[in-house]
Image (cartoon, rainbow, N blue to C red):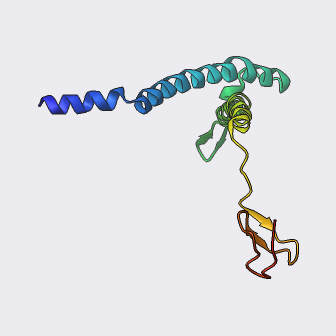
């Protein structure tokens, strides 16, 4: 029984699971914030532009079914804003950091000056034309 709890403790205290839990909590809070921005700020602005009181509740009926297109547009705007923020504040900075951290790859081949074939960089003679290569 003690082994069971020890294994669970090891699992929980591993770096990946803690990082994942923090990421999920921060992501949920970020999602709530974006939803509030869309619902409380952007949707009323759209309502002002198209002269309707509550854009989020705009809908139309077809054969007794209610289609909430205002709510759908809110969800699309929320998704778009989250994607924009993640791209500009996570992906672009990480790509910039990674491009500075990565070491440039050294070439593993060179070109034979005689026959223009690619040969290993350490070769002293071309394997295709047998020309001496420096």
Q: Quadrant location of residue 51?
A: top right
- Residue at 42% across / 26% down in the picture? 18
Q: Residue furthest top?
A: 40
Q: Quadrant of the C terminus?
A: bottom right
Q: Quadrant of the N terminus?
A: top left
- Residue at 68% across / 35% down in the picture? 101
- Residue 109 vs residue 32: left or right? right
Q: Is residue 89 above or below residue 41?
A: below
Q: Quadrant location of residue 99?
A: top right
Instruction: Examine the rendering and report whether any part of residue 73 can be seen.
Output: no
- Residue at 68% across / 33% down in the picture? 94
- Residue 34 vs residue 27: left or right? right
Q: Is residue 89 above or below residue 130?
A: above
Q: Residue furthest right?
A: 114
Q: Nearer the viewer, residue 49 or 29?
A: 29
Q: Position of residue 57 (x, y in %)?
A: 66, 27
Q: Quadrant location of residue 14?
A: top left
Q: Nearer the viewer, residue 114 or 78?
A: 114
Q: Nearer the viewer, residue 82 or 116?
A: 116
Instruction: Examine the rendering and report whether any part of residue 23 can be seen.
Output: yes
Q: Nearer the viewer, residue 58 or 112?
A: 112
- Count of numbered marks: 0
- Residue at 70% across / 32% down in the picture? 97
- Residue 130 vs residue 8: left or right? right
Q: Position of residue 2 (x, y in %)?
A: 13, 28
Q: Position of residue 46 (x, y in %)?
A: 79, 25
């Amino acid at each position: 029984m003690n082994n069971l709890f020890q294994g669970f403790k090891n699992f929980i205290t591993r770096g990946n699971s803690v990082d994942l839990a923090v990421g999920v909590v921060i992501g949920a809070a970020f999602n709530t914030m974006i939803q509030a921005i869309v619902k409380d700020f952007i949707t009323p602005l759209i309502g002002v532009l198209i002269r309707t009181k509550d854009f989020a509740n705009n809908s139309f009926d077809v054969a007794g079914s209610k289609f909430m297109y205002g709510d759908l547009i809110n969800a699309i705007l929320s998704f778009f804003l989250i994607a924009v923020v993640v791209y500009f504040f996570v992906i672009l900075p990480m790509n910039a950091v990674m491009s500075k951290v990565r070491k440039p790859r050294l070439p593993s081949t060179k070109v034979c000056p005689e026959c223009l074939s690619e040969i290993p960089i350490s070769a002293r003679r071309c394997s295709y034309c047998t020309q001496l290569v420096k």
